[in-house]
Structure formats: C-alpha cells, structure tokens
Image (tube, grey):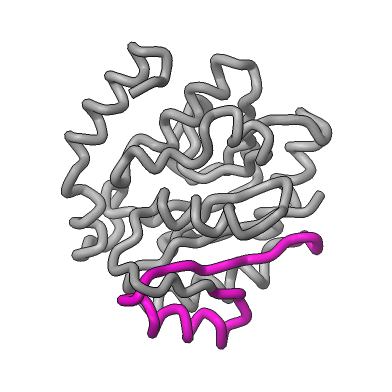
Amino acid sequence: MNVAAIMPCRGRVDQTVRNVKRLLATAGYGDWRLTCIGGDTERDVLMACSGAGAKVRHILGADRLTYWQAMAEETRLTDAPFLVNLANDLLPGQHWLGRAVAAYQATFGDGPGLLGFNDGHHETEHSCHFLISRTLLDDYGGWPVWYDHNYGDTELCQRAIADGLYAKAPWATLFHDHPYFGGDDDNVYAEGRAKAEQDRLLYERRRLNGWRS
C-alpha cells in the first residue's frame, strides 16, 4: 500500500525540521514518502526539510499557498493511491503510519475510505489528519481548495461518514500541538484564522446544498 504523506509548509523552520525528523523516525512503515511543499516564501524551510531527509517541492511564483492548495498541487504530481495530509504542528507517536495502514486495511481493505489519526483532542466523528484513498478523494472533488484554511477536513470527514467510509485509529497518533488546545500561537496561525468565518459560512452553505457551492 503505497502512501504519499504531504506536509504544506509555512514558516517555523526549526519546528518543522524537528517534526520531519520525528515523522521519519517513528513512521513504522516502509512503502511511503514524505514531501514538504511551499511557495517562494518557504525557500528556507524547504531547504532545511530536504536536509532532514524529506522530499521537497518548491512552487515557484507562489507566495502563500493555502493548506488545501498545497495538498492539491503535490497530489497532482504524485501517483500514490493513498494520501496523508500532515502539518508542521504535529507530534507523531510511535508507528503512527504503520498503525494507520493496518487499521485502514482491516476496515476497508484496498478499497475507498478515510481513516483518521488520533490527534489527542477530537472524538470519533472528526479527524484533522487522515489517510484517504485517492479514489474517494477524487469522488469528493479532490482536496477542498474552495476553503481558505478551515473546514476542509470537516467536509471530507462528514462526507465519508455519510457514505459509511470513515473510521478512526485510536493508536495511530498525530498529536495536534495547536494553540486552540494550549500550544504556542504565532502569525501563521493568525493567517489560518483570518477567514475562518468565511470558511464556516461556505461549509454550512455547501452542507445544505449537497456539497455544492
């Protein structure tokens, strides 16, 4: 089961490099690749990630890629049938990916599905980070680039739940060290919050309209 794990990057060079090293050291799985992706402003962090052992992709001519734009860009350039959306504020647990793959295969086999990681905060109905089949992602229109930052994960999880194609792996841990839960705040989080209300209203409109804008 070949997996492409994608980490959109924005600032936080030291934190991101620590995260990359820990993701690589604790994955507990062999058939996968970690790619860090960012625009022109992320040249320094991408160079550092490359030195830490990750594949990197630098999108020239782009300043700020949104999280979902970065996910979509790298997904377009890889042929892996299974995808993981990562972030640079995660603390991966031992065998985070190996346990997720095992749980996915036990639940969905090699078919379509969405398998959530345990982020230490959300209950079973939601996962900020997950392992998803490309087949299911394509059925849902790809990564939700229509959102600036928020609610894309919510939409994908809710659609998978409605289709009976969602599960969560309690021991596949990607702890989300987010200021909402007591982590350190910074300007990158502020960017992500800037259009939160706009994203929320779009989510509600799409939900009521059968996931059409």
Instruction: List x then y, in percent, for residue 23.
Output: 60, 66
| Left-right relation of 111 to 152 | right
User: In the image, is residue 60 above or below residue 2?
Assistant: below
Was residue 27 drawn as part of the magenta stretch in this picture? Answer: no
Asked if one can make out residue 79 in the rendered structure from this viewpoint, the answer is yes
Q: Is residue 106 visible?
A: no
Whether residue 132 sits left or right of residue 183 in the image: it is right
What residue appears at the point 34 percent right and 38 percent down from the top-left corner?
A: 146
The one nearer the camera, 56 or 185, is 56
- Residue occupying image coordinates x 31% and y 46%: 149
Counting from the top left corner in percent of width and height, residue 16 is at: 44, 73
Question: Residue 207, percent across and down?
Answer: 36, 17
Q: Quick check: 210 above or below 56?
A: above
Residue for point 54% across, 29% down:
140
The question of residue 30 being in magenta is answered with: yes
Q: Give the quarter of the figure containing the C terminus.
A: top left
Residue located at (25% from left, 63% from top): 188
Per the rendered image, the range of residues in magenta is 28-56
Q: Is residue 106 above or below residue 162?
A: below
Count every numbered label the image shows and give the total: 0
